Image (cartoon, helix red, strand yellow):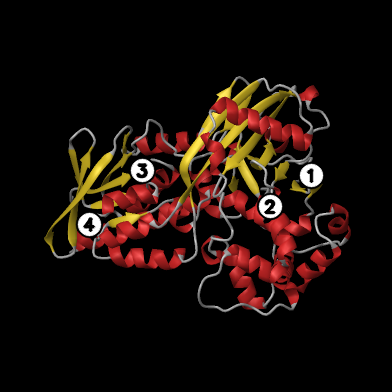
Amino acid sequence: MSPPRTVVIVGGGISGLATAFALQEQAAAAGLPIRCTVLESGQSWGGKIVTHRIGELITEAGPDSFLSQKPAGLELCAKLGLTDQLINTNETGKKAFVLYGGRLHELPEGLVSFVPNQLGPFLRSGLLSWTGLARMGLDVVVPRGPSEGDESLASFFRRRFGAQAFDRVLEPLMAGIYAGDAEQMSLKATFPRFFELEQQYGSIIRGMMAAKKKASSAPASGSTCTMFVSLKNGLGDLVTALTTRLTRQGVELRLGCQVDALRVRSHQLGRWMYDLILNDGSALSTESLVLAPPAYVAAELLRPLTPIAGGLLEMIPYASTATIAMAYPADAVAGAVEGFGFIVPRIEGRDLIAATWTSLKWPHRAPADQVLVRCYVGGVGREVILRLDDDQLAARVRAELSALCGIKAEPGYVEVNRWWKAMPQYTLGHLDRLTQLDAALSRYGGLVLTGAGYRGVGIPDCIRDGAVAAGRVVHYLSVKAAS
């Protein structure tokens, strides 16, 4: 029997862990013996997936859910035996709101899906004027844009729906996902589906209506998931299940292990060994290397190998954000909170990006006599607020909730979580830079990049990209073993 092939994964966030899991699965299917090591410079696994349990409160420092329409997340939960722990958003109170003119307006479902079922909710919302609604409807006659080149989200949605719909609704919905500036964000890298709909149907509204008609005529899938799902006891259980499974499979997991430098050597054309210089002065050699840290960390490691790749990775900017969780006595906020929460357009000039009434949106998050709230601040162009200390930041957020929702009570629990340079920004030309990056790294067989900085920031995106990275490693090592 041939000796096991060696693989090292740098980065123990969801991308690195998912890569290790897929690697074990795919290598076993290929009959390829491997020895895998995962290195994480921090003191905990999971990256931004961090669940805190305080008495009966469950708070999420980072993401609180993932999109069920992208199958990779649900599939991984099934493989880890977590399907029975999946929870949907609460059935009641599904409304969401948007701030406009200093007042919260209910967000009609039609504005979110771009396919208005009824005109009444649009008119009653007060979000769009008659001219704004008419301009949005002109999407069905606005010519399609060019198929070549890139376009910013702001340019695309203003062109298709008008400035009013973009500024008041679309911008905060999209900025809430990326904490970014729609003027700089690439349409093709962030929301390629809208580009595809325009090219195929010449109109987003026509395209969405066609997709809705097609979905209604398709056989029922049997899925009972809401658009977003979470785990009963928090997303931290996904990380725990992953690390437990990997340990059982013989994967070596090493915390507090930072890679200070990367060297390469080759004794055969196209075949490399990667030498990692660790922070304790030791070295670790491997036949295949997966880099799963933020792009700017990977840039420092790769610059000595290829300055071009290092420079391209440095061109992926990252935004800083913070989440502030607060628990209020339920009777003290009665009538002040409704639905699942609200989003805040950039044009309103507020500190908040969004707020979620966590215990109203999700079951099992707080006892009945408390309301758990989570607020979001920071992001591109709004990071100055992060200079405040924790007490000042919480006070600023409480002032926002008081002004916007009338919440005057003192929270019984406050938790501030800061995420410095944690949200990658897919700016104009992002996909072209990825193509150039692949070319710059093409000579280094067995060296693979994965993570939120490249092809999707959501949990399912990272899981899917990790599986693709694992497939590339297995293919490389299988070919190498056969040669």
**Which of the 4 image quadrants contains residue 95?**
top right
In the rendered structure, which amino acid carries the disc numbered 3? Gly
Disc 3 to disc 4, C-alpha distance = 19 Å
Tell which circle, 3 or 1, labels the residue nearer the N-terminal end.
3
Q: Using the rendered image of the protein, determine whether residue 32 is visible from the camera's viewpoint.
A: no
User: Which residue matches tag 4?
Assistant: 305
Marker disc for residue 366: none
How would you rate the neighbour count of disc 3 (Cα within 10 Å): few for under 14, some for 14-19, many for 20 or more? many
Q: Is residue 306 left or right of residue 410?
A: left
Q: What residue sits right under mark 2 in the picture?
A: 347
**Image quadrant containing the C terminus:** bottom left
Residue for badge 1: 104
* Left or right: residue 33 compared with residue 132: left
Q: Nearer the viewer, mark 3 or mark 1?
A: 1
Q: Label 3: which residue?
A: 11
Answer whether residue 243 is visible to the viewer in this image.
yes
Distance (Cα) linking label 1 and label 2? 14 Å
Location of residue 35 in the rendering, given as x and y in whole percent from the top left corner = 26, 44
In terms of sequence position, does the residue under pointer 1 or pointer 2 come before the other? 1
Residue neighbourhood size for the residue with mark 4, other residues' Cα within 10 Å, grouped as few (<14), some (14–19), many (≥20): some
Against 266, residue 261 (above or below) is above
Mark 4 / mark 2, whichever is N-terminal: 4
In what element is the residue under mark 2?
Answer: helix
For this orientation, the residue located farthest to the left is 267
